[in-house]
Each structure stands twice: as C-alpha cells, then as structure tokens.
Amino acid sequence: MYGLYQRLRQVTPSPLPIWVIPAHVPGHWTMVAVDRAEHIIRFHDSFPGRAHSEDDEWKIREEVVALLGIVGEASPEKWVWISETVSAHNICI
C-alpha cells in the first residue's frame, strides 16, 4: 500500500467534475461515481443482496475516502455517501 500511496501523491487529479471508478469486490464489479462539485459519492451495486455485500461496500467506502484524502479533496465529513442498488434484472443496455 505504501508504494501505491507514494505514486498516487504524484498524480494530478482530473479536472473533470465527476469521476467514475470501477471497484472490484470478490467475484463482482461495482461502480463509484464521485461528484466533486456537489461532494456526493454514489455507490452502484447491481447485486446488492449477495453475501457480504454490506461489508464490501464499507471496504470500498474506506478506500474512496482514502483516495480523496490522497488527492487533496475536502475532508470526509463534507462528503455524502449514497448507495444506489439496482437489481441486475432491471439494467437495460
């Protein structure tokens, strides 16, 4: 983790107002959308009822908060975390 931390400190954050971050949990991909202008983090999970999904969300939340701290965004208490779970059967492509 230390090496990753050192490399991330050298990265210039994207000026885009919304970051879309894929987040892998065991056997499943989720998505995090970080709205930098509104200080809102939206967590999207298409399989919310699977075993350990709440634990996985908390781990991702901790990692996103750490990432925001590394790139110099506002302190964690200024951000709102919103879980947006949608059944995989309701996703249209």
Image (cartoon, rainbow, N blue to C red):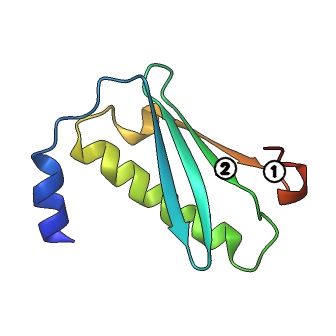
For residue 74, what is the image quadrant? top left
Secondary element type, mark 1: loop
Establish if 10 lies above or below 22: above
Judge left or right: residue 21 versus residue 14.
right
What amino acid type is highlighted by mark number 2? Answer: His
Residue at coordinates 90% horizontally, 57% vertically from top-left? 89
Mark 2 and 1 residues: CB-CB less than 8 Å, in contact?
yes
Specify few, some or many for label 1: CA neighbours under 10 Å numbering under 14, 14-19, or 20 or more: few
Query: In the image, which disc is placed on residue 53?
Result: none
At which x and y percent is residue 7?
A: 12, 56
The numbered dot on residue 86 is 1
Q: Label 2: few (<14), some or many (≥20) within 10 Å?
A: many
- In the displayed structure image, the side of residue 40 where residue 93 appears, left or right: right
Instruction: In the displayed orientation, state which residue is furthest to the front.
Output: 93
Residue 50 placed where, x, y %?
A: 78, 75
Q: Is residue 10 left or right of residue 42?
A: left
Mark 2 vs mark 1, CA separation in Å: 7 Å
Q: Earlier in the sequence, mark 2 or mark 1?
A: 2
The kind of secondary structure element at disc 2 is strand
Residue for point 24% across, 34% down: 13
Q: Position of residue 33 (x, y in %)?
A: 54, 39
Looking at the rendered structure, the number of numbered marks drawn on it comes to: 2
Q: Quadrant of residue 56?
A: bottom right
Residue that appears at 42% across and 22% down: 17
Is 34 located above or below residue 67 in the figure?
A: above
Q: Residue furthest right?
A: 89
For the N terminus, which image quadrant?
bottom left
For label 2, the residue is 44
